[in-house]
Image: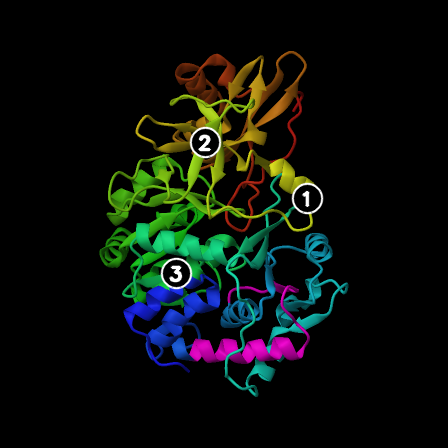
Amino acid sequence: MPAARDSGQVAAILIASVTLPQLFELSFTLRRDQPALEWDRTYTFGELDRRAARMARVLRRRGLRSGERLAVYLANRIEFIDLFLAATRLGALFVPVNILYRDREIRHILADSDPVALVTSDAQTDHAPAEVPLWRVEDLAQEAETQLDTPLGEVTSGDAPAAIVYTSGTTGVSKGAILTHHQFAVNAIHLLTCWQIHAGDRLLLTLPLFHVHGLGNGLVCWLLSGCRMRLQERFLHQQIAEQMLAFQPTLFFGVPAMYVRLLEVEEDAARRIGGAMRLFVSGSAPLPAAVLEDFRRLYGHTILERYGMSETLMNISNPYVGERRPGSVGLPLPGVSVRHLDPEGNPVPDGETGELHLRGSNVFPGYWRRPDATAAAFRDGWFRTGDLAVRAPDGYYTLQGRRSDLIISGGFNIYPRELEEFLAEQPGVAEAAVTGAPDPVRGEVPVAYIVPRGAWNPAALEAACREHLASFKTPRAFVRVDRLPRTALGKIQKHLLPPWKRDS
């Protein structure tokens, strides 16, 4: 392997190319003998580099070539990292598949991406369709042990696709977002700078690696920063306090559902966890302002909330230094341009709701083999996010929900996020989701789905809404549910809520 480079050579790499293998070489070479990953044991960066080189040779021997796709259906494990690194070195497109998906969903992704093979484990083979070759990760790992660990490299351009990440499909069939080496690199460089991620950090990663939150923010930022990471197969709320106390992380990426669970940790343990921590980050779904405040009192930290998408990685973030505003996702990240427009494409003034349009090096080139969907997703070169937001005079953005979630009742706009935040503050409410139901007079009316916390009183909720909100915003019904349907990252799938009927 090449000798460690001086700072001038490192700068030359960053200027000349931003392919992921070249960026990761900074840690694989400069920190070769330093601890990198805690899994079944502690691995150095040099060991991970050699593992990736051997796995790349296995994949190439099995026929994977530059530009082809490799689908991976695995829970978090070290071989997931091996496969991602190997695929990016070969110039192949890495296609992570949600481990919670089953036959119908997996078949859609495989038919759309047309991969060379689907990699899965013994534990998941029952759910793997037979339409494409099936490669057992256990076999790949065994083959890799016999391979040379000299490097292979075929990707030469940062504009080359690195992955196809399928959208969560909260409103329909998921689409494959093409993510380039540049996108992953720019995202990581932004976060290392703006969130001050450095080699001395200790990252506890419980997010699934098949999602951009775990893959782009977790795995890529870890490798580029050279920090130490402990990878967990998944977030287990019964064990999370013990895991944090043992590892003493300084950095944690989570989703709102995780932070709700962390509020259950005993006060003394929470204070000890907070004493070692530098930064808690939340994303992938809106963080209720009440959770942020309760967490600050318990852990002594203000969670940093940010806003990203599968198509763009990170767009907007509360500042590391400065006000982390409850309910807000913060300010645009460097290099991310934001337009705030009405449905006709006109600018929306501060304080009013509009759709976010984005432009920058973080924005994807398009959807895999979907030119129609790609064309519909852009307006004058700007990506139409479908997310509604309000901009404050000082530039902070507060999300109001998806454009498709907007309820128009009797000509009035109702933004579900506003109602959900209000309901979550009421006694007896653990969680709330608001959707629109057809109405012969008003077109639509809001309906609230409530996950109760102990005793709850629908009449009291209705009275509170009528007292504090405009009359047209008061939900027509309050429907009790045991849980809200969610994606693996905690985003509510409102189309899976039980339909409300007027006579129910």
Q: Nearer the viewer, residue 305 or 28?
A: 28
Q: Position of residue 102 (x, y in %)?
A: 67, 56
Spatial separation of the CA atoms under disc 1 and disc 3: 32 Å
Q: Position of residue 323 (x, y in %)?
A: 26, 38
Q: Which residues are magenta?
A: 47-76
The three-letter amino acid code for the residue at tag 1 is: Pro
Quadrant of residue 231 in the image? bottom left
Q: Look at the picture and state if 490 lies above or below 243.
A: above
The three-letter amino acid code for the residue at tag 2 is: Arg
Which residue: 31% across, 44% down? 295
Question: Could you tell whether 194 is left or right of 163 in the image?
Answer: left
For mark 3, what is the residue?
15
Of the residues tagged 2 and 3, which is closer to the observer?
3
For mark 2, what is the residue?
339
Does residue 476 show up magenta in the picture? Answer: no
Q: Nearer the viewer, residue 213 or 419?
A: 213
- Can residue 8 be seen here? yes
User: Which badge, 2 or 1, comes first in the chain's sequence?
Assistant: 2
- On the rendered image, what quadrant is the N terminus found in? bottom left
Which residue: 60% across, 47% down? 366
User: Which badge, 1 or 3, comes first in the chain's sequence?
Assistant: 3
Q: Look at the picture and state if 249 lies above or below 303.
A: below
Q: Secondary structure at mark 1?
A: helix
Quadrant of residue 396 in the image? top left
Question: Could you tell whether 124 is left or right of 391 in the image?
Answer: right
